[in-house]
Image (spheres, grey):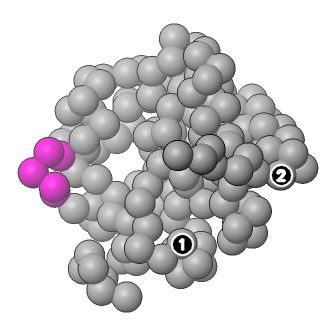
Amino acid sequence: MSEKPRPSQKNFDKMWKYAEKFAEKSGTSLHPDRSITEAVVLGLAENMDTIGRPLCPCNFYTNKQEEAKNRRWMCACDEMQIFKYCHCFLFVTPEGMPITEYLPEGHEGRRIYGLVKDPTPDQGRALRANAEKATSEMVDTGQGLTTPIWPAGEPAGEE
């Protein structure tokens, strides 16, 4: 099997610089295992190459072009901007754990990782005012609450 082509160096460097700056601004750290950070940044750079937007590479989308029109999963995604939770493990605590302190009870992140306190509560969460609305749009997968991939109001599988 042939290896997947690497994204452009220009977009890789751009996304790496963005990740570093956003981590500093939000009071988070890039994952201490550089291979995790690099994998996510490679995915962001690939999406920049193919669709022109830093769409979160850690989700499956039936149509990336359509999803790119919706701001919800652009890095830093709404979950990060509202709850300071990065399911990609790009923006984490210095120990490499995703911050779950602000997630609603029952969210899959809280169920999986427990309560992970925010070491810098005075930084990040630019969209915190949207927490109530975002929580009301979450769906219960049976494994916990999660933010849907499809646009709010549309059931999965419809375009």
Displayed quadrant of residue 90? top right
Q: Give the range drawn in magenta.
A: 140-144
Q: What label sits on residue 64 in the rendered view?
A: 1
Seen in the image, is 107 located left or right of residue 9? left
Residue drawn at the location 76% of the way across and 51% of the way down:
7
Pointer 2: what residue?
Answer: 8
- 73 w.r.t. 21: above or below: below
Residue drawn at the location 69% of the way across and 71% of the way down:
51
Q: The disc labelled 1 sits on which kind of residue?
A: Lys
Residue drawn at the location 28% of the way across and 53% of the way down:
146
Q: The disc labelled 2 sits on which kind of residue?
A: Ser
- 150 w.r.t. 110: above or below: below
Q: What label sits on residue 137 in the rendered view?
A: none
Q: Nearer the viewer, residue 82 or 20?
A: 20
Q: Is mark 1 on a helix, strand or loop?
A: helix
Residue 143 colored magenta? Answer: yes
Seen in the image, is 103 located left or right of residue 66? left
Disc 2 from disc 1: Cα separation = 19 Å
Return the x and y of residue 122 as percentages of the image width and height. Answer: 61, 29
Return the x and y of residue 32 as percentages of the image width and height. Answer: 60, 15
Residue drawn at the location 41% of the way across and 73% of the way down:
62
| Farthest residue, direction left | 142
Return the x and y of residue 56 as percentages of the image width and height. Answer: 56, 54
